[in-house]
Image: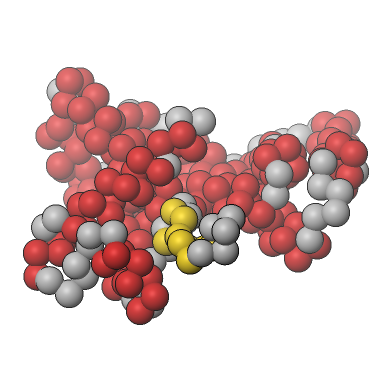
C-alpha cells in the first residue's frame, strides 16, 4: 500500500507512518475538482451538453488527450516535489513558456521574431543556471540520483503542460468549465486505476499493518467499510498538502 510505510520510533520499537503517494494525492485533487465543476455546470444549465459532448463534439479526441497530458503534468509536478526542494522544482516547472513557444511555432504556425527567440532561449539558459546554483536552489549535499529524477519529473511537468496549453487553444470554442470538468473526470479515472492496482497488490507486511489498525483485508465487507477508512485516512493525511 503506497500510503503505509514501515518505520521505527525513537526508542527503536517497530511502528509505521503514513506516506502520501503522489498518484493518491493527484486522484483526490482531480476527484474533488470534477465534483465541484459538475456542480457549477449544473448551475449553469449545461448538464445536457455534458452528456452529449462525448458523442457529438468533433474534437473529442483532443479533449481526451488534453485530459491525459494534464494528468501526466500534474502527477509529474507532485512527483518532482518529492525528490526536489520546492524552490528547485518550481524553477524547472517555470520553463513552461519556453516549451509553449516552441510548440506554438510547430503546431499553431505562430510567428516569433528573432529577437523574441533569443530572449526565450536566454531566459531558459538563465533558469538552468539558477537551478544549478546550490546557493539559489538550496540543494547542497543532496543525493545526485534524487536530483536527476526530480529534474526529470519537473521538466516532464513543464513540457506536458505546454502540450495542454496547445490543446486548450484548439478547444477555444468549448466552454472553459466543460474543458476543466472532462479533464478532472478522465484524469481521476486514470489515477484511480493506479491507486486500486496498488491497493490490490499490497504486500503481506502492508496488510499486517492495516489489520493491526482495524482493517480486515480478508473480509468481504472490506470494500464497504475498511476501504472507506483507508480513503478517509488518506484524505486527512493529504489535507494540508492539497490546500497549497
In the figure, is residue 227 to the left or right of 136? left
Residue lying furthest front: 11
Where is residue 242, by image quadrant? top left
Residue lying furthest top: 43
In the figure, is residue 98 to the left or right of 115? left
Answer yes or no: is residue 23 visible.
no
Question: Does 194 sit above or below residue 40?
Answer: below
Name the colour scheme.
secondary structure
From the top left corner, tell me how far across and down residue 138 is, in percent. Answer: 82, 41
Q: Residue at x 71, y 44 (%)?
A: 85
Q: Residue at x 45, y 60 (%)?
A: 16
Answer yes or no: is residue 115 visible.
yes
Question: Does 31 sit above or below residue 61?
Answer: above
From the top left corner, tell me how far across and down residue 188 is, in percent. Answer: 33, 50
Question: Does 94 sit above or below residue 155?
Answer: above
Closest to the observer: 36 or 201? 201
Q: Residue at x 42, y 58 (%)?
A: 3
Quadrant assignment for the N terminus: bottom left
From the top left corner, tell me how far across and down residue 102 is, in percent. Answer: 71, 46
Q: Residue at x 35, y 67 (%)?
A: 209
Where is residue 101, by image quadrant? top right
Where is residue 39, by image quadrant? top left
How many badges with numbers are in the image?
0
Residue lying furthest bottom: 204
In the figure, is residue 78 to the left or right of 224? right
Closest to the observer: 58 or 46? 46
Question: Does 49 sit above or below residue 82?
Answer: above
From the top left corner, tell me how far across and down residue 172 is, in percent. Answer: 42, 32
Amino acid at each position: 500500500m503506497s500510503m503505509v510505510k514501515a518505520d521505527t520510533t525513537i526508542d527503536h520499537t517497530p511502528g509505521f507512518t503514513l506516506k502520501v503517494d503522489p498518484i493518491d494525492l493527484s486522484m483526490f485533487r482531480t476527484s474533488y475538482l470534477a465534483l465541484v465543476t459538475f456542480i457549477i455546470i449544473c448551475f449553469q444549465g449545461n448538464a445536457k451538453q455534458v452528456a452529449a459532448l462525448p458523442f457529438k463534439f468533433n474534437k473529442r479526441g483532443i479533449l481526451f488527450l488534453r485530459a491525459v497530458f494534464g494528468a501526466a503534468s500534474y502527477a509529474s509536478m507532485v512527483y518532482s516535489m518529492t525528490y526536489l526542494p520546492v524552490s528547485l522544482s518550481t524553477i524547472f516547472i517555470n520553463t513552461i513558456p519556453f516549451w509553449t513557444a516552441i510548440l506554438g511555432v510547430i503546431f499553431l504556425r505562430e510567428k516569433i521574431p528573432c529577437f523574441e527567440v533569443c530572449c526565450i532561449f536566454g531566459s531558459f539558459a538563465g533558469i538552468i543556471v539558477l537551478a544549478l546554483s546550490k546557493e539559489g536552489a538550496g540543494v547542497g549535499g543532496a543525493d545526485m540520483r534524487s536530483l536527476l529524477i526530480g529534474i526529470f519529473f519537473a521538466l516532464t511537468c513543464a513540457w506536458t503542460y505546454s502540450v495542454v496549453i496547445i490543446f486548450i487553444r484548439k478547444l477555444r470554442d468549448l466552454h472553459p468549465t466543460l474543458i476543466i470538468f472532462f479533464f478532472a473526470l478522465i484524469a481521476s479515472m486514470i489515477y484511480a486505476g493506479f491507486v486500486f492496482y496498488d491497493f490490490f497488490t499490497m504486500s503481506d507486511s502492508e496488510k499486517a499493518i492495516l489489520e493491526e489498525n482495524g482493517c480486515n483485508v480478508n473480509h468481504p465487507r472490506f470494500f464497504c467499510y475498511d476501504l472507506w477508512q483507508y480513503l478517509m485516512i488518506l484524505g486527512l493525511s493529504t489535507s494540508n498538502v492539497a490546500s497549497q
